[in-house]
Image (cartoon, rainbow, N blue to C red):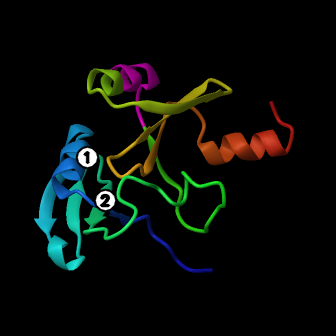
């Protein structure tokens, strides 16, 4: 087994630097470094929770189209980023107030989840309080209440 200590960051390819930075800043992320965005290196965005997102760019094709989620045929790759939030209702109010479209929702065993998309249609799943999604799925698969 690999001795993994924690998840460090996720890299997200973007096509519009200003729109993407503004979107993630709205969610509370702050740009702490530009590693060379114009040469394909990351804009490092850090959230007060400690979550680190690297915005990579610039994308050269498929602007505004997510090939992993928007096409009928399914390619391998990371389909979404799930973020646990403290309050599902307050999160939904905030998202609506910011004019961010909710593209999906789910509630299972009291855990409320909404889905939003960034300017490049990358999916973010905002998971409310309750058991982890891993536990919810495992319980469901194994027939537990």
For residue 101, what is the image quadrant?
A: top left
Image location (x, y in percent) of residue 144: 83, 36
For residue 116, what is the image quadrant?
A: top left
As drawn, is 100 to the left or to the right of 81?
left
Majority secondary structure of magenta residues: helix
| Image quadrant in which the N terminus is located | bottom right
Give the residue at mark 1: 24
Q: Could you say which disc has been placed on residue 107 in the image?
A: none
Residue 91: say if magenta. yes
| Image quadrant in which the C terminus is located | top right
Image location (x, y in percent) of residue 50: 29, 53
Q: Is residue 49 above or below residue 45?
A: above
Question: Residue at (20%, 65%) from the top-left corner?
Answer: 43
Compute the Cα span from label 1 to label 2: 9 Å
Marks 1/2 in contact by CB < 8 Å: the verdict is yes
Identify the secondary structure beneath mark 1: helix
Give the residue at mark 2: 53
| Closer mark to the observer between disc 1 and disc 2 | 1
Q: Nearer the viewer, residue 41 or 132?
A: 41
Image location (x, y in percent) of residue 88: 45, 25
Q: Is residue 53 above or below residue 20?
A: below
The residues colored magenta run 85-93
Q: Is residue 91 above or below residue 68?
A: above
Question: Residue at (58%, 55%) from the top-left corner?
Answer: 71
Q: Earlier in the sequence, mark 1 or mark 2?
A: 1
């Amino acid at each position: 087994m690999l001795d993994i200590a924690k998840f460090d960051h996720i890299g997200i390819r973007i096509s519009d630097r200003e729109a993407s930075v503004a979107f993630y800043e709205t969610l509370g992320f702050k740009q702490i470094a530009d590693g060379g965005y114009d040469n394909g290196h990351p804009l490092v965005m850090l959230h007060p929770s400690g979550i680190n997102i690297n915005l990579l760019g610039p994308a050269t094709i498929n602007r505004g189209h997510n090939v992993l989620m928007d096409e009928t045929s399914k390619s391998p790759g990371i389909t979404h980023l799930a973020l646990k939030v403290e309050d599902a209702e307050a999160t939904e109010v905030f998202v609506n107030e910011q004019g961010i479209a909710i593209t999906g929702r789910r509630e299972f065993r009291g855990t409320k989840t909404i889905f939003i998309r960034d300017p490049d249609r990358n999916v973010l799943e905002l998971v409310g309080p309750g058991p982890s999604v891993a536990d919810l799925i495992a319980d469901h698969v194994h027939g537990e209440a």
